Amino acid sequence: MKRIAVITGASSGLGREYAHAIQNCLSLDEIWLIARRLPQLEETASDLSVSAVPLSMDITKAEDLDRLKVKLEQEEPDIVCLINAAGMGKIGSIAALSREDTVRMIDLNCRALAEVTNISLPYLGKGAWVLQIASIAGFQPMPYLSVYAATKAFVQSYTKALHYELKERGVHVTCVCPYWIKDTEFIGLAAEKLNDYRFMPLALKRIDVVRKSLSDVRVNRLLSTPGLISSSERYLSRLLPDNLIMTVLDHFRKI
Ligand SMILES: NC(=O)c1ccc[n+]([C@@H]2O[C@H](COP(=O)([O-])OP(=O)(O)OC[C@H]3O[C@@H](n4cnc5c(N)ncnc54)[C@H](OP(=O)(O)O)[C@@H]3O)[C@@H](O)[C@H]2O)c1
């Protein structure tokens, strides 16, 4: 049976970095690279030493998810690694967010992530890894990043339950909760027109997030919080009231 890794969001940023990082471990036969932009997927594939299959798919579309499901049913691979890295955010007040962006965030960050996971589940055997990319935004409500933060709270909650449910099957599931990462396309797309959240002290690099999360999933950690700010926020959000955290966050936003 073919051993594969499935990575969504593989045309850039974290997804591409994960493809590089896992290519020589797990004795993979193939890496399936999923995102909408085919040229960028082909670029990711061409840099890899393992066989890579670029799959141009919009995972918010039912017909594209059906294509993935059918491909899995036909090939019946052993998915040894599933990484759900596709995601998007838009910065701005709830009033300023367009209806389309509001729905796109919910569709991609929540529904598509859960659907790709669901479709992949039958092919995840003992020893497989699942990495779900959430964010520290999911630890508390975030004014001016409200919908995004709420979608990542969904990812955290869903992934914690998945971690618990798949323990018996010997599948490791880790929810990755990074702070701002500056060397991906995310911030440029999130802040296209808006100028909030410019102050990003100690922003992470994607390689740090990837290294930390891969070491965490190896030992089946529930959460991976790379860097000082992600780790501090994880604990502070449990100790401090939401109102206080939102006031502090708003202060940083205005700097
Ligand atoms: N960068 C940060 O500051 C930060 C912080 C915390 C968490 N995160 C999370 O990290 C994850 C990866 O983001 P990143 O920083 O690597 O950003 P990125 O460079 O913008 O990558 C996002 C990826 O998602 C793919 N994607 C977007 N819409 C899609 C769709 N409808 N169907 C399929 N793929 C789609 C994009 O490819 P196409 O455009 O080709 O489809 C791209 O490959 C996201 O879940 C994000 O929320 C990012």
Image (cartoon, helix red, strand yellow):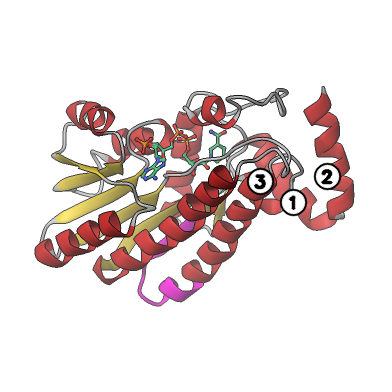
The image quarter containing residue 47 is top left
Q: Which residue is mark 2?
A: 246
Describe residue 19's horizontal placement relative to residue 186 as left or right: left
- 17 within the magenta span: no
Q: Quadrant of the N terminus?
A: bottom left
Nearer-N-terminus badge (2/1) = 1
Disc 2 vs disc 1: Cβ atoms closer than 8 Å? yes
Point out the quarter of the image occupied by ligand 1.
top left
Q: Amino acid at mark 3?
A: Ala
Q: Disc 3 versus disc 1: distance between alpha carbons?
A: 7 Å
Asked whether residue 240 is in view, the answer is no
Q: Position of residue 77 (x, y in %)?
A: 16, 61
Q: Which residue is mark 3?
A: 137
Q: Residue at x 62, y 36 (%)?
A: 227
Asked whether residue 161 is in view, the answer is yes
Q: Which residue is mark 1?
A: 141
Q: Position of residue 187 (x, y in %)?
A: 56, 28
Residue sitting nearer the eye, 145 or 1: 145
Relative to 199, residue 163 above or below: below
Q: Amino acid at mark 2?
A: Met
